[in-house]
Amino acid sequence: MNLSLFQKPSRYINNEVNSLRKEGEVRVALAFPDIYDVGMSHLGLKILYKIINDLPYASAERVFHPWLDLEKEMKHKGILLSSLETQRPLKDFDILGFSLQYELSYTTVLNMLHLAGIPIRSEHRAEKKWPLIIAGGPCTVNPMPMSPFIDAFLIGDAEEAIVEILDTYRLWKKEGDAKKEAVLKALSQIEGMYVPSLHTEHVKRRYIESLDNFPYPESPVVPYTQIVHDRVNIEVSRGCTMGCRFCQAGMIYRPLRERNPENALRIAEKSLKNTGHEEVAFTSLSAGDYSCLLPLLKAFNCRFLDRKISLSLPSLRVAAVSQDVLKEIKTVRKTGFTIAPEAATGRLRNVINKDFTEEDYERSLKMLFEEGWQKLKLYFMVGLPTETQEDIEAIPDMALKALKIAKKHTNRYVTINITLSPFVPKPHTPFQWYGQENIGRIKGKLNFLKNMLHRKKLTAKAHNEEMSLLEAVFARGDERLSNLIEEAWSSGCILDPWTESFDFNKWASAMEKTGIDASAYAEKAYAKDELLPWDIIDTGIKKEYLYKEYQKAISAEITTDCKKTCHACGLECKDSGESVIRSIGESATDSPIYPFTHSPVKIRVEFSKTGKLKYLSHLELVTAITRAMRRIDIPLVYSAGFHPSPRISFGPALGVGISGIKEYFDMEIKQPFDINYLLSEVNSVLPEGLKLRDCALISAKEPSLSSFISRYEYEIICPDSSAAEQFSGKEETDIREMIEDIKVMDKKTVRLILVDRESKKIRLGELLPEIFNVLYGELDITRLAMYGWKEKWTAPLERDMAWLVKS
Ligand code: SF4
């Protein structure tokens, strides 16, 4: 398939650095019900990919939903959805493991099954020939709406349970038992597993005791395309002690488990070595509360400063922002900064248990702007329990205050982006009994706020309220909703989290057809003793505790951080009430000494881009080569300033889908460095399709490749070369002056020599369809060589060129 015809083809080319091809006795496809860019950013998928592929008898591959253009083509041509690694159709795997991160991905799960030729309902997959469909992730704490489609759910942490699941499956497969029921019965005995067909009445959430006892993906797959979180992510803690009442993650990932900071640093070292990434994020539900944050950040910078590795943290609690932390974050590059006040009045913050004062807010912003940040994101929720007009009107005031503080403490223009999200009451939180505010009223509030913020010259965007309605419906709903999911999917709803594909009208007609009143589900307020659809799932947190918290919320009463005082939520933490003090040993802060004292040298490199890697865009190509250099510690020279980047400059860009045989880049390297090793070293870590062919030292004063190169040699494979032959006989045209030569090699192959003219640069997309009389996408294009004028046409790396410095 010609992938150039689709958006971002590098999503589909596979063969990324660190991807594995293994044939296990038990074959698992890790399926993410969203596109590559989102799925590849998900840590859980990377953890499972490692754990499964580490097992001697099992193998894991990845599969994502294609973007809309490719999905249409697959349906049109009847192409089955397959894994990335081996291109095996999903129906030929033993297990498909879906990650349910977001309620709006439910229709995409159905579509992936359908694209794979697998029946969507479990009852139609009773035969052994169908793969077992398992789902995990946060949405499984209410598995009911998806229960007719999924054979078994894993509730909670997967690190331990996945091995038990695969052991159980392997045994069943070996025994040759033809009945799927047998394996489902065996799986239901594993703690954390819910098998809908067995109508289990009580399922305990699974959680691991310590993050340090389990393997971490230190060689994650390095994507070619830019993904949502394109960096090394290190989970420094799981769980949270702050007890925000709206936050499902804060409840269902309890208790708090912190990673040993020395382990976090070791993971950072290995992951950077294995990936060549330029940024590390220390992730956590509340990174500012990680007990060893500052020593970890200091040790990290001490170790990686020379390599220009920047670090980032997810959004910080207002009260957790500190000057020392800010100084460490900005050491290499200032990554974006996000603060989530969620509510703008002290009263409403007490309701949701977000414990910070106006003074905390002002102090944090002052520090942030004083440290030089010029971009800030603020998150607020709308439709929170007990919310009044006063609470709503306070949001623009709070945002404006940020602008005023910025003005006072910086002399620059500061961008403040405000994100507004409708509140969605989630199961297993103190607000699970509360019904979502009517979506019409939410819409009114969002419009009011957007207007107010716009008038105050602030940028605001609001989450789609209809998406939030559906999120509440499926988060709080029961098994009957499966009919709505199926109806919406069959009327074309897929990739619902994307505005490009979300169509509420289709959902509305699905509601009408199924007779399901979505608003009634979302807005339903439950009574204290009423049975909740998700009651069979026991997260370990007592319902009485959640209800007590709900009552405290109504009376705007705060519950303190349970790191200081245990509030007996039901989990009986071993460390309850004690804060964990960890430290980093001396060795962790040792900084490597680099003996680079001489002035840098400039090297010109010739390389090729062929095979599937022809689908890389120019930016993706630059990233792939730069990351390869980092993986083998090439001592790159960086630009100065706020965003240091390697001093590498490429020749004229190659378009997506075009191969290149003699391409070039110049780079600066610190001395001492043995140039003789450059090609073999870099080639040993480059993916198949990228190859360095030659290199030489050049003078620092040499003109850049982009100003030097102006003549190009192409080979084009086309449906019929006679069109080019006829074109070569045509009279002078506008584009004719750019064509130096057209040589027809055979019936399908043509060689072209093109030259930039002073007034006009070559644009292949315009030029080639005129010559070949076909659509650009139908041509297979290779750039064979490039030249610049130096008394005669000369290749950028010709050995006899006077300006080449002897190495
Ligand atoms: S048992 Fe106590 S310390 Fe542990 S999570 Fe619950 S409230 Fe917090």
Image (cartoon, rainbow, N blue to C red):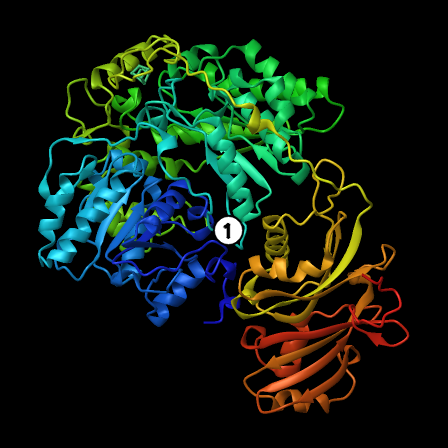
Q: Residue at x 33, y 15 (%)?
A: 575
Badge 1 crowding class, 10 Å Cα cut-off, few under 14, some 14 to 19, many 20 or more, is many
Q: Is residue 137 left or right of residue 4?
A: left
- Taking depth in this image into account, of 654 and 493 the one nearest to the observer is 654
Residue 158 vertical position relative to residue 659 in the rendered view, above or below: above
Residue 85 vertical position relative to residue 590 in the rendered view, above or below: below
Kind of residue indicated by mark 1: Val
- Taking depth in this image into account, of 23 and 730 the one nearest to the observer is 23
Q: Give the residue number, with chain letter if any, for mark 1.
A: 222
- Taking depth in this image into account, of 518 and 544 the one nearest to the observer is 544
Which quarter of the picture shows residue 759? bottom right
Which residue is most to the right? Answer: 791
Q: Decide if residue 7 is in sight here.
A: no
Q: Residue at x 36, y 69 (%)?
A: 76
Q: Is residue 130 left or right of residue 319?
A: left
Measured as percent of width and height from the top left, residue 623 is found at 61, 53
Q: Quadrant of ligand 1?
A: top left
Quadrant including the C terminus: bottom right
Measured as percent of width and height from the top left, residue 675 is found at 73, 58
Which quarter of the picture shows residue 91? bottom left
Measured as percent of width and height from the top left, residue 355 is found at 45, 13
Measured as percent of width and height from the top left, residue 160 is found at 27, 38
Q: Residue at x 15, y 18 (%)?
A: 529
Q: Is residue 444 left or right of residue 176?
A: right
Q: Residue at x 34, y 66 (%)?
A: 75
Quadrant including the N terminus: bottom left
Residue 462 vertical position relative to residue 381 in the rendered view, above or below: below
